[in-house]
Image (tube, rainbow, N blue to C red):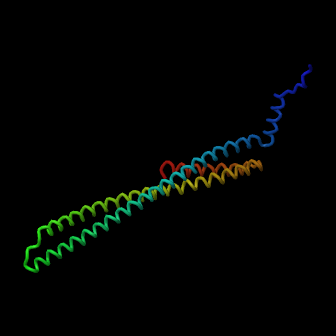
């Protein structure tokens, strides 16, 4: 049985490669490569942006909870202060009547003062923790903004890469590459210490 006509595929491949090179094939491969790298960086930056904003929101929520607990402690502090004042007024009433106040009034007054002291310490500790969480959340939001800017720069770079591929304009690709490098720089600055 006769075989089909033999086609020299090596020669065909060389011809196709020559045509691609002639029509901007090297540029297209370069554009495709840089666009793929920038797309990967944009995905990483997007994940970092989402992660930092989620963590910041969780810290802000925790700070709000700590503030509520601190407010409760300050209310308890005030209540114990009122009880101490009332107890002191009762002791003064007994003294105004030239009578000895009951011993339990003195014990209660001391307990109220001690409770008030503990409540104040606890409230101040809760407020310190709240401030730490708030500061950490603010730093994360600062990083989030840079990650988001990085994503935007990389996305514009990718779009310019597509325009460069369609128009086969090297200058457009250079602009795409420069913008992508700036986006990568912003990402690196945020990731490594900004």
| Left or right of residue 61, residue 83 in this image | left
Where residue 111 appears, as percent x and y from the top left, is 19, 64
Please count the marks in the image.
0
Q: Is residue 19 above or below residue 178?
A: above
Query: Quadrant of residue 23 in the image?
Result: top right
Question: In the image, what residue occupies the spot 76% across and 41% down?
Answer: 25
The single residue placed furthest to the bottom in the displayed view is 97
Nearer to us in this view, 190 or 107: 107
Instruction: Work out whether residue 13 or residue 27 is closer to the camera in this orientation and state it.
Output: 13
Q: Position of residue 97 (x, y in %)?
A: 9, 80
| Residue at the limit of the structure toward the top, as seen here | 1
- 190 w.r.t. 14: above or below: below
In the displayed structure, does residue 155 sit left or right of residue 99?
right
Q: Is residue 59 left or right of residue 109?
A: right
Image height of 15 relative to 63, above or below:
above
Residue drawn at x 66%, y 54% as measured from the top left: 156
Question: Which residue occupies 29% across, 66% down?
Answer: 76
Q: Residue at x 70, y 52 (%)?
A: 160
Residue 166 position within the rendered picture, expressed as x and y whole percent measured from the top left: 77, 49
Q: Indicate the quadrant containing the N terminus: top left, top right, bottom left or bottom right.
A: top right
């Amino acid at each position: 049985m006769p075989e089909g006509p033999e086609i020299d595929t090596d020669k065909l491949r060389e011809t196709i490669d020559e045509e691609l090179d002639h029509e901007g094939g090297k540029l297209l491969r370069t554009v495709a490569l840089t666009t793929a790298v920038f797309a990967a960086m944009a995905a990483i930056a997007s994940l970092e942006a989402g992660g930092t904003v989620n963590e910041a929101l969780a810290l802000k929520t925790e700070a709000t909870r700590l503030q509520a607990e601190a407010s409760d402690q300050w209310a308890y502090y005030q209540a114990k202060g009122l009880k101490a004042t009332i107890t002191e007024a009762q002791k003064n009433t007994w003294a105004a009547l030239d009578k000895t106040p009951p011993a339990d009034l003195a014990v209660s007054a001391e307990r109220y003062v001690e409770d008030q002291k503990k409540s104040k310490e606890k409230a101040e500790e809760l407020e310190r923790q709240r401030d730490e969480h708030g500061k950490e959340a603010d730093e994360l939001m600062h990083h989030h903004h840079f990650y988001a800017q990085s994503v935007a720069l990389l996305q514009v770079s990718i779009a310019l890469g597509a325009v460069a591929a369609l128009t086969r304009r090297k200058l457009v690709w250079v602009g795409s590459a420069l913008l992508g490098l700036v986006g990568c720089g912003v990402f690196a600055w945020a990731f490594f210490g900004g």
